[in-house]
Image: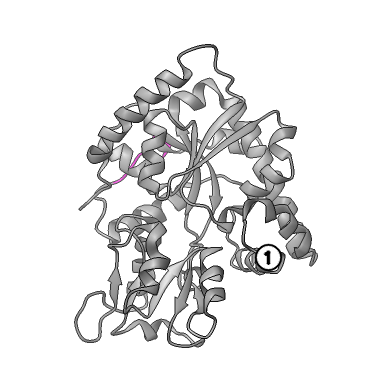
Amino acid sequence: MKKLKFVVCSALCLMLALSTTLFFGCGKRDYNKINFNEVTHSIFYAPFYAAINLGYFKDEGLTINLTNGGGSDVSMTALLSGSADMILAGPETVVYTDQEGISDQPMVFGQLTQTDGSFIVSKKGASFSIQDLVNEEIIGGRAGGMPAMTLQYAIENAGLSIGTGEGEVNLNTKVAFNAIAYEFENSSANFCTLFEPNATNLVASNPDKYHIVGAVADLVDTHIPYTCFIAKSSYLQKHDDVAEKFLKAVRRAYLYLKDCYENNHLRDGANALIKSFDGMTLDDLEVAIEAYYRIDAFSHDMIMSRQSLQTLLDITENAGMLNGNSNYEKIINTEIASRLA
């Protein structure tokens, strides 16, 4: 497979589009009420949830109707069908749609994270180096998704080979993103990658068996445009004021959590997130916030640069998912985020 199979998704798009037409067909649409689809629910996207819980979207006159895709391909399908106005997903999906020739091209209009946000979980004890993956299986998510592609990039940059032979790393890319923890618990694999809160929740379920031993970000020596806010080009043309208010609220929350981290007010940051993470304690959330700010996970200005796009293309090409380049101006909108600087 060289690209995400949007041909397969087209049937889903049609069904979703029909249901969306029925839902919005009567009456005038209020575009300050944003139908928003997230690729997964993770503390990795902390500023977004803090903006909801602290009332920053409300301050901008916005209401967020939040749904979960459980994978970037599903989230992009929601956007293409019209059931979502905006999505939070990996920017590789925008590159895929560009190279598939999708009409009304989806565009990145704000970058939320700038590195991999997954953590390596081990069944083999608390110590770890990347060499420990040799002759082991690590579950890295779905082929074509940023978690799997970034992990492959890190493994190969360390001089290791991926495969099932002696002296190689068995990178399992056949597991759906939201099924990794279950598969890890019920398989012989000794390693997997998980985002928060899944990593902490798994370790808490059996701390003698499972250990968080590192962050994939620590294995990669460059910033990566990992998760971005995406909307159709037509939406951004007609409702750029809504998109600007949206980014303004998220950036305000990013700065709030950054202040909590830098001034050791992590409990305040945890309180800003607790409503979005049932089952997690304030202590757990403090640990996660500290971990993500430690690895400099969040984009400082929300602008996706040309260099970031090139890094993304390098990672996707290394994974054998794409051939050729994409036009920066066609798939990246920097104007809206630039207004916040």
Q: Is residue 17 left or right of residue 121?
A: left
Q: Which residues are magenta?
A: 325-330
Name which residue lies at 53% across and 11% down. Answer: 27
Q: In the rendered image, which quarter is residue 269 located in?
A: bottom right
Residue labelled with disc 1: 281
- Magenta run includes residue 327: yes
Q: In the rendered image, which quarter is residue 252 located in?
A: top right
Amino acid under label 1? Thr
Residue 7 pos. (x, y %): 22, 38
Residue closest to the eye, 207 or 250: 207
Please state, as top left, top right, bottom left or bottom right, where the C terminus lies in the image: top right
Name which residue lies at 41% across and 34% down. Answer: 79
Residue 156 pos. (x, y %): 32, 73
Tally the numbered discs.
1
Q: Can residue 178 be seen from the camera position used here?
A: yes
**In the image, is residue 55 above or below residue 25?**
below
Residue 26 pos. (x, y %): 49, 12
Q: In the rendered image, which quarter is residue 295 located in?
A: bottom right
Residue closest to the eye, 19 or 289: 19
For disc 1, the neighbor class at 10 Å (few under 14, some 14 to 19, many from 20) is few
**In the image, is residue 290 above or below residue 53?**
below
